[in-house]
Amino acid sequence: MKTEYSTSASLASLMQDVVLLLRSNDPENAQVMDMLTKAKRNYVKERHPRMISQIHSKSKYKDGKWKTYVYVDEKRKVVEANTEEELYTWLYDFYKAQDDAEKTFEDVFLMLEDKKRRDGRTDQTLREDKRHFGFLSEEIRGKVITEITEDELRDWLVSNYMPARPKQEALKKTLQLIRAVFDLGREKRLCRENPAEFIKYTDYASLCDLNVKTHEEKSFSEEDTARLREFALADQSNPHSVAMLIAMETGMRAGELASLKKKDIVDGYLHIHSQQRMERSSGHQQHEDLGFTKDQRQRPRGGRYFPITPTLEKALRIAANLPGASEYVLHNKNGRAILKGSYMQHLRRVCKSLGIEITNNHAFRVALNAKLINEDIDGLERCLILGHSMQTNERHYSYSDQRRLESIRKKLTSTN
């Protein structure tokens, strides 16, 4: 008769064998201990993304010690030990205690954020995750992940979340985040099921805020653009004002403007193929240039080219006369590239000072798209130079204001 053993029974038996071996006087014990040490190190490395380093200090109390840091209740804690082995032992005990404890939904969310941070996701992405996670009730956030049910999530949606009338995009992202937390929980064997798996966005989409901004509510008007141009031309020594001139002619995103280099001006075109990304580290803001634009982040294709028109050429000549030497088109006196955050703040202040209600750089992009439509440049051509898909163009850049309708009316009436 065949005997079957459960996984837990087999594991218990294995542990008894290991303990028995360690109690013996067999010389192979050293090999077993070495295996256990390596296993502990690998266990720590899988969970600890931060650097472990030796301290080199003039202080005799610190010199030669080993250190790293961990997060406890979202606060950074420095950990020091006399030897590297002692530090790994401390970290093993620290993470083992976490793994042995039952995980709340918030615990697994923090694990997901840590994973995303290691995978190089931006600070902005992590902030957005935290914002959407904050919509969840405290009861769900603090509940053990295995105890959360689909009915409980649906009750929260109906009674708590949907009455606030979120936008459809916010609903999508919130549900995606909830599912991602449960998926990680399953991957780490912290829960068996994903109770959000069958909660569909379409079940609640009709309860969202369905109001759509008109073209006029998200685009600078011709009068707005003229006033902003007049302001910028009177402020030519300010790189942020010069950025406004280039933005209104190209529809470039703020990050693309900040990373534009002089070598990107090629044979009558602007080669737009990079963007500036801002990161916050230890309370300081840092920036780097990424070698792809927003629309090509998943599949870089070398960017796009924008033809240099006479008005754009004039803006580029003004940029070339900015004080200081730099490889960047838009730079400060010290030669450093402008920061996209500083540019957006400048634009916001200028718009408010001129009494213009819309204050974001994206309004230049929408306005340019409308201008191109008026000049009979088709959708595919607009997508080519603005850097977005046809689907995005139809969804976010449709031009349906009164002037467009009037043009259509005239065409229809002239045929009758």
Image (cartoon, rainbow, N blue to C red):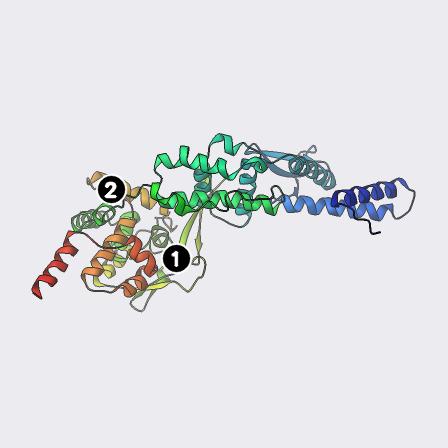
Quadrant housing residue 300: bottom left
Amino acid type shown at disc 1 = Asp
Residue depth check, mark 1 versus mark 2: number of the one nearer the observer: 1
Question: Residue beneath label 1, please?
Answer: 295
Question: Left or right of 143: which side holds 410?
Answer: left
Question: Left or right of 169: which side holds 69?
Answer: right
Question: Residue beneath label 2, please?
Answer: 350
Which residue is at the far top?
Answer: 139
Q: Is residue 135 visible?
A: no
Q: Which of marks 1 and 2 is nearer the N terminus?
A: 1
Label disc, if present, on residue 174 of the rendered structure: none
Amino acid type shown at disc 2 = Val
x, y percentage for residue 133? 46, 38
Residue 129 or residue 281, whichever sits in front: 129
Q: Quick one: SS at disc 2?
A: helix
Is residue 41 depicted above or below 70 in this figure?
below
